[in-house]
Image (cartoon, rainbow, N blue to C red):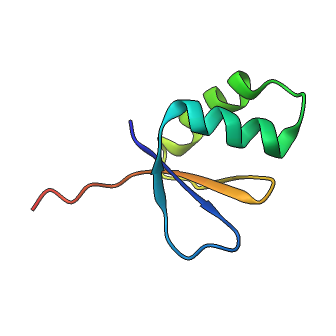
Amino acid sequence: MNIQTQYNYETTWTVTNEADLLRIIEEEIGNADPNGTLKYIKEAIKTGKTITVGSCRFKEEIKNDK
């Protein structure tokens, strides 16, 4: 699963690796559980949702099968 991120001041989505996802989540939520939050994000975006944590949004990358 590829996860894309976008800060509220950005206009484009970026595919982000798991280490950077954890860093972003930790920056946004502080000392809360970044691993648990990432697990929640992964489950939620499977249904097509976009999840916002602080000032960053997360969604699953949609690939066109053309």
Can residue 34 be seen from the camera position used here? Answer: yes
Residue closest to the far left: 66
Total marks in image: 0
Residue 30 placed where, x, y %?
89, 36
**Residue 40 as seen in the image, left or right of residue 49:** right
Q: Quadrant of residue 31?
A: top right
Residue closest to the far right: 31
**Residue 62 as seen in the image, left or right of residue 41:** left
**Residue 23 as seen in the image, left or right of residue 59:** right
Residue located 59% across and 38% down the image: 20
Can residue 43 be seen from the camera position used here? Answer: no
33 lies above or below 27: above
Residue 41 placed where, x, y %?
62, 38
Residue located 61% across and 73% down the image: 10
State the quadrant of the C terminus.
bottom left
Residue 5 placed where, x, y %?
56, 54
State the quadrant of the N terminus.
top left
56 lies above or below 20: below
Residue 26 placed where, x, y %?
78, 35
In front of the other: 11 or 46: 11
**Residue 47 as seen in the image, left or right of residue 41:** left
Q: Quadrant of residue 32?
A: top right
Q: Quadrant of residue 25?
A: top right
7 lies above or below 63: below
